[in-house]
Image (cartoon, rainbow, N blue to C red):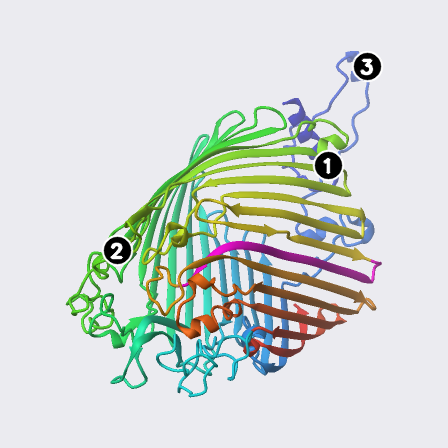
Amino acid sequence: MTRMLSFITMATLLLASSGLVAAAEQPPAEEAPVRITDQGADPASAAEQPAPAEMEPIPEIAEDFEEFVGQDFGEQYFITHDAPYQPWLATRFGWWGVDVDGSRSGVGEWQGLDSSSPFWDVDGLRSNGYETVDFFATGTENETTQGGLHLYLGPRLTVNMDYDRFIHRLGHKPLGGTALPYTLGDFPLQGGFFDPPPTPQGIPGLAANGPGFPMWGEDFSIGQNHALRVQQLKGNFQGDLTENLKWRLNVWGLKKEGFRQVNSTQHCFNATSDPNTLVPGGSCHVVSKSQHVNWLTMEIEPVIEARFGWLTMEYSRTMRSFQQDDEIVTGNFSRGTTTYGLGPNAQNGAYAYVPENYTEIDRLKFRGQMAPNTDLYVVGHVGNTHNKFRDSDRKFYGADARLTNTAIDGLSVTVYGKTDTQRNSEDTQSLSAAGRFPGQENLWLETNPTGVPTPPQSIYAPDVLYYQNLVDRDYLAAGVKGRWRPFHDYCDVRSGLSLTGGYEYSQLERDNVTYRLRFMTPVELFTQPTTHTHMGFVGVQQEWGRTLSSYVRYRLIEREWPLVGVTHRAQIGLDQAINSNQPEHEDRIELGGTWTPLDNLMVNASFWLINSYNRSEFVNFDEDSYPIVISAWYGLNDQWSFTGGFATFSNWITQDITLGREDGLTTNEARAWTSPWDYAGRADVFNLGASYAVTCDLTLVGGIEYVRSRNVFADPGTPPAENQATNPPIAALPYSDLPGYSAVRVNTMRLTAGVDYELSRSMNTFFRYNYFDFDDRAMPYNAGTAHMFLGGLSGVF
């Protein structure tokens, strides 16, 4: 209270001295002015004191601000200036000139590359101290637009909106390959996938290309440049209802429309270009068509959050809908055998159909400090995805709970557990059933060979286990992780040491994963076992000072029975029927750090050593990977600035692969045989950028980026003599074309150069040149180059 009175007294004196204190009404004439005397003085001496002089009049309140500060500089108590003007709007406008040579699939996968298109950008920010609006809109070219609005209207309402529009070119992947005559090693084997009409020119030792050849392709979309135009909208609305009650509304939408390439395959195809002519034995028939698609995904999520003391609760409901208006494409699915036939209407069956669906997810979250130094976080969810096409459901539910304790200084420990369950309803009704899709009963081909609508579980009778119900899953995990700074209270380099570690156990149990290997003697059933996983990690991080930090981490993963793939018909043994690309054992070592020896130099580097393998009874593979990432920045002086980076990503795989006819029962086909395959993949990335300030008004920029990528695997070779069939084509040219189907040999180079010149404090001019070369040496039809020129002006207002 004493301090408050002192403060009031001081403020009053200051205001009085500056003429701001209002003069009270003058006391009545009969009242004498108040005088303060020395209480300790003698009354007589006090009475002898002379009468006080006449009091000065108390100044009146200033009428306006100018009167308060004074007109003359010497009389001013405050000196004021007009606030400097603050620009609130930035704009840019320019124009592209583009020249493209070759395919646009690579150089223009994510951009329009029109020969001429505008570039524009508007960015603004306004605020009155209580409310703020921040907005931007950018059109980088004709096919790309971005926009955003961020609005703050006080604690009751905040709005964030973002819109994005772009093109995604998909290109066209031809079924045909190099021109005949075929040279061993060319991609792909022209006789393997080719576009009719058939030609009598064949490969020595092989039948003429055309219907009846082991692989026959028909491409009905030659020359079509497939692309999707994508639009995405994100929105977030939130505010406070009361001090302890908040609301949010999240919205999201994604629209894709355009043309895509869709392929279908039919085994034992016995028709020709003439529907009245059949081919004995049949072919594997591959068809490619162009399909117009129109997909719309919309999601809305209301959220309510309430705080009750130390506990905060949040409830949200996600509602997501996928709708489509796609063109229906059809193919000829006739077969030379009726055992697994698709009914009498198989010559006109629909494929590449994307079902509409609707998803609902309810989430409940709890978080808070349940005790000193102990934080709790729990989230539970339950939901369902309804497939409107199949009239089926996928129900799922789960929970995630975490408890974090920091009672010991420098130590943070978290224990957690999580679970997730999926349950799928059975597809018990045929799509071809009368009344289900009026007028389209013959399109879906879910009938038995005699044309009777049949549920998918039994459509392949007599092998009722050939088609499985959707897989149900039960997943649970529990673990502990922590971070310890043993010298957190020291003032030397030891305080920068931190140790991390943790362990997690998880299991994944599946249902509907039993397969009947019906050509084995005796017949066997194989069921995918439950997957058990143990994962542990440790790490050390050291801050050596302001200029250097480093870390090393190690992660170990052990799995028992990871997911396997099963070819469950016509097998001669489990070893040929089962394979997997999932490892049983995995080791990961990561090293890295950041070095800043000077104020104008920074280097960051990281290096991984990853080894994984699966050497179980039925699977055998080994994989190694050694990623490296290095980046640096250097400021030579006030004018020069450089950035650079290098990265390499690689993996080498050796895996046993089974080829050939699985059961070996047919004399004109190779019997199954297993051999090791060697695969290698590598991508190298190099980039360098520079900026040079020639003067205060003129800046030059430039850069280069080069990427080299390769995917190759060795020729699997010729089957052993005991596995070779009697048919000459198989013996003459077994599988030497397979490496070509996944070959990647792509080099890309991007060069950039630019000039920025400041015309005035509020206006700049700019020029950019961008050269992009996409050199696809494995698939030359994707190769292309682009020269892009941009010039324009920018200003602030």
Looking at the image, is mark 2 or mark 1 earlier in the sequence?
1
* Residue occupying image coordinates x 79% and y 25%: 51
Element class at badge 2? strand
Can you tell which mark lies on residue 775? Answer: none
Q: Name the residue under label 2.
A: 392
Circle 2 crowding by C-alpha within 10 Å: few under 14, some 14–19, many from 20 = some
Front position in the image: 733 or 388: 733
Query: Over which residues does the magenta segment extend?
Result: 636-660
At label 1, which amino acid type do we have? Leu
Q: Residue at x 23, y 55 (%)?
A: 464
Q: Which SS class for mark 1?
A: helix
Instruction: Please tell me whether residue 54 belongs to the stretch shown in magenta.
Output: no
Classify the position of the C terminus by image quarter: bottom right
Q: Mark 3 points at which residue?
A: 45
Residue 354 is at least partly visible in this image: yes
Q: Which amino acid does label 2 sit on?
A: Ser
600 relative position to 746: left or right = right
Q: Which of marks 2 and 3 is in front?
A: 2
Per the model, the C-alpha gap separating discs 2 and 3 is 110 Å
